[in-house]
Image (spheres, helix red, strand yellow):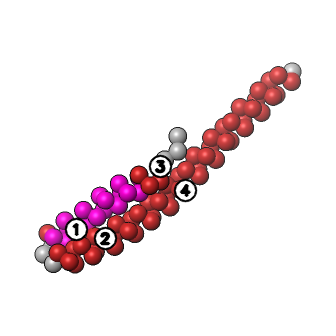
Amino acid sequence: MLLNIRSVSVSVAVICFFSIAVIGWISGLSPSTCCKRALTGAVVTYVISACAVKMINCILINAITTSIMNKQKEETIGTGN
């Protein structure tokens, strides 16, 4: 089963946004600074996680197609005898 790129990336970005905002708030930064840093971190995290999910999906598709091809090859060899 392939992963949904948008849902995974948004979930990770939201967690990152709030984590960075809370860390900034605890550190005593101004709210605007916390917001800017959290937003920047969330955008970067979204892009990176989207790329990672795309790579995982490519690996899964490759594994699935290889598995299907091997099964077909075994069936072909098995029926030839």
Identify residue for label 2: 39
Ranked by sequence position, the earlier of labels 1 and 2 is: 1
Q: Position of residue 43 (x, y in %)?
A: 38, 68
Q: Position of residue 7 (x, y in %)?
A: 41, 52
Cα gap from disc 4 to disc 2, whole angstroms: 24 Å
Circle 1 or circle 2, nearest the eye: 2
Please, what is the three-letter code of the amino acid marked with disc 3?
A: Asn
At 19% from the left edge and 72% from the top edge, which residue is drawn? 24
Q: Is residue 51 above or below residue 78?
A: below
Cα gap from disc 2 to disc 3, whole angstroms: 22 Å
- Kindly check if marks 1 and 2 are in contact, taking CB atoms under 8 A apart as contact: no
Q: Is residue 75 above or below residue 29?
A: above
Q: Is residue 72 above or below residue 40?
A: above
Identify residue for label 4: 55
Circle 4 or circle 3, nearest the eye: 3
Q: Dot 1, crowdedness within 10 Å: few (<14), some or many (≥20)?
A: many
Ranked by sequence position, the earlier of labels 4 and 3 is: 3
Position of the C terminus by quadrant: top right
Cα gap from disc 4 to disc 3, whole angstroms: 12 Å
Q: Is residue 74 above or below residue 6?
A: above
Q: Position of residue 74 (x, y in %)?
A: 76, 29
Q: Position of residue 44 (x, y in %)?
A: 40, 69
Cα gap from disc 1 to disc 3, whole angstroms: 26 Å
Span colored in magenta: 8-25
At 47% from the left edge and 53% from the top edge, which residue is drawn? 5
Marking on residue 4: 3
Marking on residue 21: 1
